[in-house]
Amino acid sequence: MKFYPRRAAQNINNTSYICHAMNFSKIIIAVDGYSSCGKSTLAKQLAKALNYIYIDSGAMYRAVTLYCLRKNIDVNNAAAVINTLPNIHIDFRRNAQGDNECYLNGENVEAHIRSQSVAENVSEVSLIKEVRQFLVQKQQEMGQARGIVMDGRDIGTVVFPDAELKVFLTADLHTRTQRRYEELLSKGIMTTLEEVSQNLQHRDHLDTHRQESPLYRAKDAILLDNTLLTREKQFQMVFNMAQRIIAESTTAEQIN
């Protein structure tokens, strides 16, 4: 079996260092964790490096939330939210840069779903059992062909419990608050560190205490605290894991 030089992985913009040949097994990579731990950043890096499809499951919940807010549907009224689900179609399309963007009923809502108003209401929407069932089914359909990286809060526990690689990200609250604050400012969204911190703590509580698919680390998930890690170091660590699992999976298939 041919292994590609590790040095090539240092440049995450170079997508050619993983063999795209059909004889390499495709796996599912699940990235779970708390808000503002860099799940999407890591998942996008891995998908690009492996030439896999990236699915942002959180964007799907945000899209449902955005739809409800636009239609003046009370997100705390579960029945009203459930009744509107048949009107919601969510898909992902690649932009000119090769990145997946979220579309809601044919409209590119990638920027809209990142607003603070959506962030403040998405956890309430995700508490609704029927919403989670609706989106989990869509996510599982997207992963049937494998070769995907999906991030969220229940990917390794509910959506893809048999994923070959599961990673659970965490970081301390101060670090997560600063990251989210800087992200919002870069998008022209004015807020305060205190507001961001309160929002993160509120979402953490809802995510970990909801009855339907609460956030927790799968038993076979690798715990990665990235408080002191750079994005590049984190990527390198998980990328190496993925390389090893793909190689092992390919070898097993060839033997069988």
Image: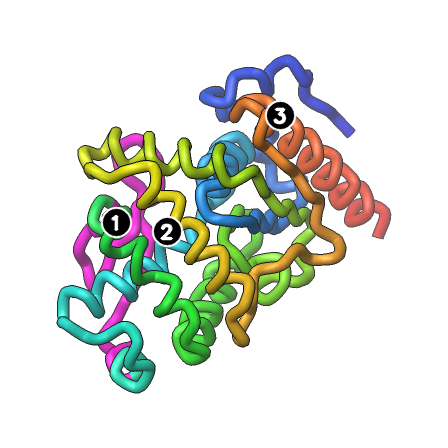
Which amino acid type is marked by label 1? Gln
Q: Given contact means CB atoms under 8 Å apart, are the residues at marks 1 and 2 in contact?
A: yes
Residue 199 circle label: 2
**Residue farthest along the right direction in this orientation:** 255
Assign a secondary structure to mark 3: helix
Q: Residues within 10 Å of mark 3 (few under 14, many from 20)?
A: many
Q: Nearer the viewer, residue 66 or 149?
A: 66
Q: Give, as a three-letter code, the residue at label 3.
A: Gln
Kindly identify the amino acid type of the residue bearing the numbered disc 2: Asn
Point out the tag, 3 or 2, that comes first from the N-terminus: 2
Element carrying mark 2: helix
Secondary element under disc 1, as helix, strand or loop, is helix
Which segment did they paint magenta?
A: 83-110
Give the spatial CA distance, label 1 vs label 3. Answer: 31 Å
Q: Nearer the observer, disc 3 or disc 2?
A: 2
Closer to us: 91 or 57:
57
Q: Position of residue 166 (x, y in %)?
A: 66, 49
Residue 170: x %, y % from top left? 58, 42
Mark 1 vs mark 2: in front = 2
Going by the image, does 242 lie left or right of 79?
right
Crowding at dot 2, Cα within 10 Å, few <14 / some 14-19 / many 20+, comes out as some
Task: Report the residue marked by disc 3.
Answer: 236
**In magenta segment, residue 87:** yes
